[in-house]
Image (spheres, grey):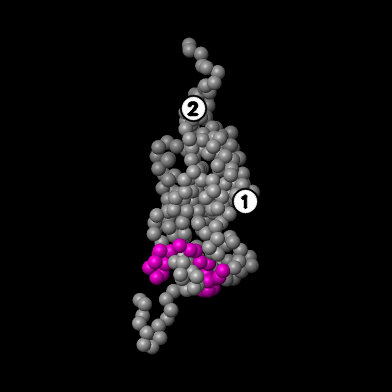
Amino acid sequence: MTPVPPDVEPVGPSVVPASGDRRRHPAPAHLVFFHGPMDCGKSTLALQVDHNHTRQGRHGLLLTQGDRSGTPQISSRVGLRREAIEVDGDTDVRLLVRDRWAAGHRVDYLIVDEAQFLTGEQVEQLAELVDTSHVDVYAFGLTTDFRTRLFPGTQRLFELADDVQRVQVEVLCWCGLPGQLNARVVDGAMVREGATVVVADTAPAPLTGDAEGAAVRYQVLCRGHYTRGQLEPTPTGPGQLSLR
């Protein structure tokens, strides 16, 4: 019997590599960030990426925070959905992965939806998993909030990701120009102040907390109509041509 060199880790049915085959055959992992405005298909792409990796025999974890469904899952507006692990600002994502390893399960990659809600420290934890454990990370999130400012998680992902890609599905403003910015609409009026995180969809829904009882939704606008706060065409008067 040929002795096993001391620097080679034995692999057999009873041994689960910490991050799949990469433990035996080290290969660079990557932190990839996909971003864009609402309705550009980020969650759909996240589920597609997971599907493609699963088909190749890889094992992953799906993470989310504040999904529009209000449940721990990744859901897209085209009807696709999968159960996911809900994280919050106190979650150490490294421990989520290590707990899976301790239970004897492989973790080859992470799918992180709503990544704009991550803290800077959590983004650094994702980068650590990539660099030290060879776990691929695919993060999906909004670019800016309703004030046109980068979310903290988005900013840190821009700073640390190996690859940053804008989701290419075109989103249109009501005027037909490319939609770039996410407007928050409360009781039919666009607002520019308030809490950074208020989870809602593109359709009105009841709020809780400070704005209890109000109807809130989000709408993607071009830069010009965001600046003017115009959510729809101005009604025409006598002698004016309709824009529609």
The amino acid on which the numbered mark 2 sits, given as a three-letter code, is Arg
Q: Which residues are magenta?
A: 172-192
**Taking 142 as reference, is 130 above or below it?**
above
Could you say whether the residue bearing mark 1 is in a helix, strand or loop? loop
The amino acid on which the numbered mark 1 sits, given as a three-letter code, is Gly
Spatial separation of the CA atoms under disc 1 and disc 2: 33 Å
Mark 2 burial class by Cα count in 10 Å: few <14, some 14-19, many 20+: some
Q: Residue at x 48, y 35 (%)?
A: 28
Q: Is residue 83 visible?
A: no
Q: Residue at x 51, y 45 (%)?
A: 161
Residue 83 x, y percent position in the rendering: 50, 48
**Quarter-wise, where is residue 222 in the image?**
bottom left
**Residue sitting nearer the eye, 59 or 176:** 176
Residue 70 x, y percent position in the rendering: 54, 57
**1 and 2 marks in contact (CB < 8 Å):** no
Going by the picture, which residue comes out furthest to the bottom? 238
Is residue 149 covered in magenta? no
**Taking 200 as reference, is 43 above or below it?**
above
Q: Residue at x 60, y 49 (%)?
A: 120
Residue 143 x, y percent position in the rendering: 50, 57
Query: Residue 89, labelled with which disc?
Result: 1
Locate the C terminus and report the quarter of the image it occupies: bottom left
Q: Earlier in the sequence, mark 1 or mark 2?
A: 2
In this rendering, would 169 be left or right of 68? left
Query: Residue 24, labelled with which disc?
Result: 2
